[in-house]
Amino acid sequence: MRKILCTILFLSFSTSTLAEISVIVHKGNTNSFNKNVISNIFLGKIKTFPDGSVAIPIKQEDESINTRFSVEALKKSPSQLKAYWAKLLFTGKGIPPKAVANDIEVLELVNSNPNIIGYIDSNKVTDSVKVIATY
Amino acid sequence: MRIISCTPALLFILITSTYSAFAEVSINGFASIRATSSDQDGDTPAHQGIEGNGELSFKDESLFALQARADMGDGLSATIQIVAEGKNNFNLEASRAYISYELTPNHRISAGRFANPLFYQSEFENVGYAYNFARLPKSVYQPFEFNTIDGITLDSDFTFGQYALTTKILYGSWEGDFFEPLTGETNSFGLDDIVSLRANFSGGWWNIYGGVIFNVLDGGEVDTDVIFAAAQPAIDFAISQGATDVEVDNFLNAIKYTGKDGRYSYLGFNIDKNDILIDFEITRYGIKDSVDVFNQVWYASLGYRVTPEITILVHTEEFTQDNVEDKFLSKVNNQILFDTGIAFAEAFREYEFKGSGVTLRHDFHPNAALKVDYFLGEDSRTDVGDFSIWSVGIDLIF
């Protein structure tokens, strides 16, 4: 019984430390998104939102959240994603999203620019932005 | 190709100047450090550029590259890529130098010097980190002199729900020195009016592609110093036996490269599902109505991603050539010259080979992959015969 309790406690702790990731856009962004569109934007396959306005994806300098987003949303391991971008970058077909410092910087950029789309820890989401998907 | 001289000071400026008043400059790069050992039954190496003396070489398959991209805003950018390859004594070479302009978010036009998209992976064949092979299959990805061309290209992206279509249309030319394996000499050669069309259609876990390239050859010294020179004794003999000037002209027109049409085509697919990886590409290329017969080559690989960091790949490939036909000699009526033409075509038919290998890839670092590869093959040339290549190396990007 003690072992079971310990396992349950461990699992709940693990879950709480790995919070969801929220994909966020500007509050005024009225586009409807599905996960394919989000994936295609972050993989550089499409460069506009559904309404035709330019989409600028950004990532974070923190590799742990990048890794989780890559695996959950893009279905690629970090090395697969790097190999994918290497093909595009060195053939002039695309450049990977720029990295910003942290959740706060993503929030500020998304809040100030309707073209930016980013992802942050769901616990850090504020009313200043719009959540379009969670992973 | 032009070898540019680059002083240490210039290199320092290139690497460190990441800020400009006019553009945001980003520097990236890739490198491969590979120890390769190849050996064969005969005295001739199986592949050009890989020494076949059984000794370990750290030069044959190693390279360093730096790419600088200046983003000037409003969709305009300039890119230069400088590569130092071990097989060229690490001399610096500007392998890419082009400007790009985004006509729309999905259409980009570029002009300058860039990769010749001969086959599916040609544009990134130097970027070892980008693929799981230790070296791309030599049956298809040979070190062609005209891997880099000058011209203009339009790249487009389209999406249809979860599917993506990318297309490329290119026009360009190439001029340079061509290594003729038959003679072991290097002579001037050229490709004019290169037109390339490619389409790539992909879903979440699959990708299919195909492309064609057309060009018109300028035989240069290969015509005058190799082919015509080699044919001269036969021409002299034919004239002594009564061959007319018209018959000789028809013969020279039949065996020369200048004005002939080059044709390249390729087709293939990739699958990456449930950690199982499959790659297949088949290509056919050659020069129409010439002494050079068409090549038909292919490769296939089956891989398994054991963990996100470790992938094992088994691969097989084959390089074959069509049998010699006499169609290119249809206007040559003189029997001596006709027989000489057939003998030339047989000589140019060079060789065939096939082989299989296994590759282990370990992404031991976020930016680097260790690759171990072993390949066994057999070559139709008697001075090559059975051959083996093994290599251990690291591919990285930064």
Image (cartoon, rainbow, N blue to C red):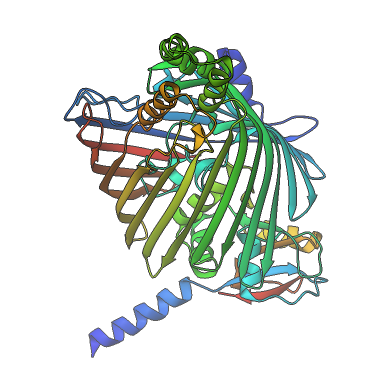
Residue drawn at the location 38% of the way across and 61% of the way down: B278
Residues A123 and B323: in front is B323
Q: Quadrant of residue B24?
A: top right
Compared to B196, does A125 lie above or below? below
Percent x, y of residue B115? 58, 36
Q: Quadrant of residue B67?
A: top right
Compared to B160, does B378 lie above or below? above
Quadrant where the C terminus of chain A lies? bottom right
Quadrant where the N terminus of chain A lies? bottom left
Residue drawn at the location 36% of the way across and 81% of the way down: A9
Residue B79 visible, this angle? no
Residues A105 and A42: in front is A42
Compared to B139, does A21 lie above or below? below
Relative side of B290 to A33, left or right: left
Percent x, y of residue B366? 43, 48
Residues B240 and B165: in front is B240
Percent x, y of residue A95? 63, 48
Residue drawn at the location 47% of the way across and 18% of the way down: B227
Relative side of B201 to B339, left or right: right
Relative side of B220 to B341, left or right: right
Number of residue marks:
0
